[in-house]
Image: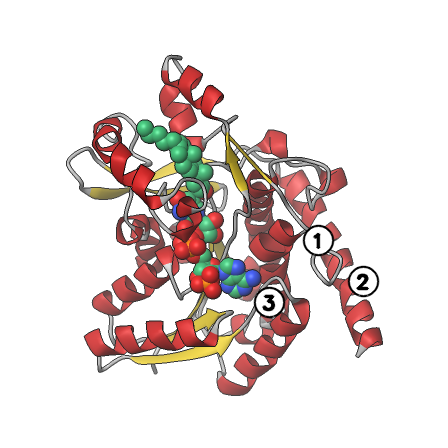
């Protein structure tokens, strides 16, 4: 039977490159591209099939920031499939980023330069907004919409017939100091992106605690810094082009500059090939690229407590319950 792999945010960037690399490794898969824009999803599907005609590629429309859309997409997936072997929870946003140029320059002359250039600590803030469901957009897109999707797909993921896998696209910029259990949506801070990525690291740990016995395993990967629509939102493409000689030099010291989405997909593809029981739930798997351009996977112990992970999980369960009631009341 063909393995079924669902990828959110498959229409561009690392999600699209991941699909291409997975089919290069095994064109006997069924890939389902979960995208918010139908035309971009179809274009990605056509390109994948042109390169691998033997593969099966389908699309499903989902806007993970809109919970009605998530419920609709999950219903459709339950209708189409009996099981999902892998779900890549990859769609993500960083709206209206602001790069602190002064902090960037002073970091270039500090001893923490490699750490700052790998994590953007102290360099970036974002403007968040509230969605029609009354939730913070970064939180709902990067974390909560995906959480509700996983809940809705439980019957396809916990089927008792071998393990299923969740693989989250996190970031080296996930930072404990930017997350608070009292404000899980980061409604009162200026670093919602970092907070959301830290929240999904916690959530992955909690999902392992609650679902491993039922055959569902969750992992967290970071693709490194790549040139995608997300990073072109931070600086325009011509500036990236101008900085490229400097970045190639920096890459000899900071392995996080994977630069291309295909390099960035390294850890996500590597995880696909691993036995879930061999992975550490408290480890983040990082794509890395050497100064000479070779890709490899490295690991980082996540800076979190399992107690906080469980508390976040419980608060997401409560929130999901409340939101469902509101949606059902309105319909
Ligand atoms: N670029 C980088 O350096 C890094 C990126 N990441 C993470 O990688 C992931 C992919 O980003 P990347 O490839 O860089 O950037 P892209 O902007 O190229 O890709 C983001 C993908 O998410 C989709 N998406 C965004 N919002 C929604 C939504 N509401 N519903 C459904 N899909 C949505 C986009 O769809 P559409 O095509 O319609 O816009 C797109 O396919 C993100 O989670 C990001 O945080 C992590 C570390 C570094
Ligand atoms: C000379 C260059 C190395 C200078 C580049 C400066 C900045 C544009 C970048 C330095 C650290 C980068 C970074 C990201 C974006 C670009 C930088 C701020 C991310 C925030 C992209 C998305 C992530 O998930 C994490 C990245 C951390 C590092």
Q: For the residues marked 2 and 1, what is the alpha-carbon distance in whole angstroms?
A: 17 Å
Q: Is mark 2 within 8 Å of ligand 1?
A: no
**Where is 278 relative to 178, above or below?**
below
Q: Quadrant of residue 303?
A: top right
Judge by depth and name the residue closer to the eye, 65 or 282. 65
Q: Which residue is found at the position 53% from the left and 80% from the top?
A: 77
Marks 2 & 1, CB-CB < 8 Å contact:
no
In the rendered image, which quarter contains the C terminus?
bottom right
For label 2, the SS is helix
Q: For the residues marked 1 and 3, what is the alpha-carbon distance in whole angstroms?
A: 20 Å
For disc 1, the marked residue is: 130
Q: Residue furthest top?
A: 110
Marks 1 & 3, CB-CB < 8 Å contact:
no
In the rendered image, which quarter contains the N terminus?
bottom left
Q: Quadrant of ligand 1?
A: bottom left
**Where is 212 relative to 222, above or below?**
below
* Whole-percent x, y for residue 189 in the image: 68, 35
- How busy is the neighbourhood of tag 1: few (under 14 within 10 Å), some, or many (20 plus)? few
Question: From the viewer's perspective, is 182 left or right of 245?
Answer: right
Q: Which residue is found at the position 48% from the left and 71% from the top?
A: 37
* Whole-percent x, y for residue 201 in the image: 54, 45
- How busy is the neighbourhood of tag 3: few (under 14 within 10 Å), some, or many (20 plus)? many
For disc 2, the marked residue is: 322
Question: From the viewer's perspective, is 222 left or right of 211?
Answer: left
Judge by depth and name the residue closer to the eye, 205 or 136. 136
Q: Which residue is found at the position 22% from the left and 82% from the top?
A: 54
For disc 3, the marked residue is: 149
Q: How many numbered marks appear?
A: 3
Instruction: Answer with mark 1 or mark 3, whichever residue precedes in sequence.
Output: 1
Instruction: Answer with mark 2 or mark 1, whichever residue precedes in sequence.
Output: 1
Q: Is mark 1 within 8 Å of ligand 1?
A: no
Q: Which residue is found at the position 41% from the left and 73% from the top?
A: 41
């Amino acid at each position: 039977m063909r393995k079924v792999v669902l990828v959110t945010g498959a229409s561009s960037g690392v999600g699209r490159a991941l699909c291409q690399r997975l089919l290069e490794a095994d064109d006997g898969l069924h890939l389902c591209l979960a995208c918010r824009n139908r035309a971009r999803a179809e274009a990605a599907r056509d390109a994948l099939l042109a390169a691998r005609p033997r593969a099966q590629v389908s699309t499903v429309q989902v806007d993970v920031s809109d919970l009605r859309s998530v419920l609709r997409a999950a219903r459709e997936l339950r209708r189409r499939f009996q099981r999902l072997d892998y779900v890549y929870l990859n769609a993500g946003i960083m709206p209206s980023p602001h790069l602190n140029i002064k902090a960037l320059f002073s970091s270039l002359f500090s001893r923490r330069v490699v750490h700052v250039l790998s994590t953007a600590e102290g360099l970036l803030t974002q403007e968040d907004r509230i969605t029609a469901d009354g939730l913070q957009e970064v939180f709902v897109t990067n974390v909560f919409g995906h959480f509700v999707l996983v809940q809705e797909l439980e019957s396809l993921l916990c089927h008792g017939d071998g393990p299923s896998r969740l693989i989250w696209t996190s970031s080296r910029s996930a930072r404990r100091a930017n997350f608070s259990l009292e404000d899980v949506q980061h409604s009162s801070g200026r670093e919602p992106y970092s907070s959301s990525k830290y929240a999904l690291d916690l959530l992955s740990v909690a999902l392992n605690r609650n679902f491993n016995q039922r055959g569902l395993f969750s992992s967290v990967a970071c693709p490194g810094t790549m040139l995608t629509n997300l990073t072109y939102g931070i600086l325009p493409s011509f500036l990236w082009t101008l900085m490229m000689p400097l970045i190639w030099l920096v890459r000899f010291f900071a392995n996080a500059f994977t630069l291309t989405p295909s390099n960035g997909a390294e850890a996500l593809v590597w995880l696909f090939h691993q036995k879930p029981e061999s992975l550490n739930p408290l480890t983040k798997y990082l794509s890395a690229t050497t100064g000479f351009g070779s890709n490899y996977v490295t690991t980082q112990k996540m800076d979190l407590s399992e107690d906080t992970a469980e508390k976040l999980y419980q608060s997401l369960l409560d929130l999901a319950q409340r939101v469902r009631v509101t949606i059902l009341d309105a319909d």
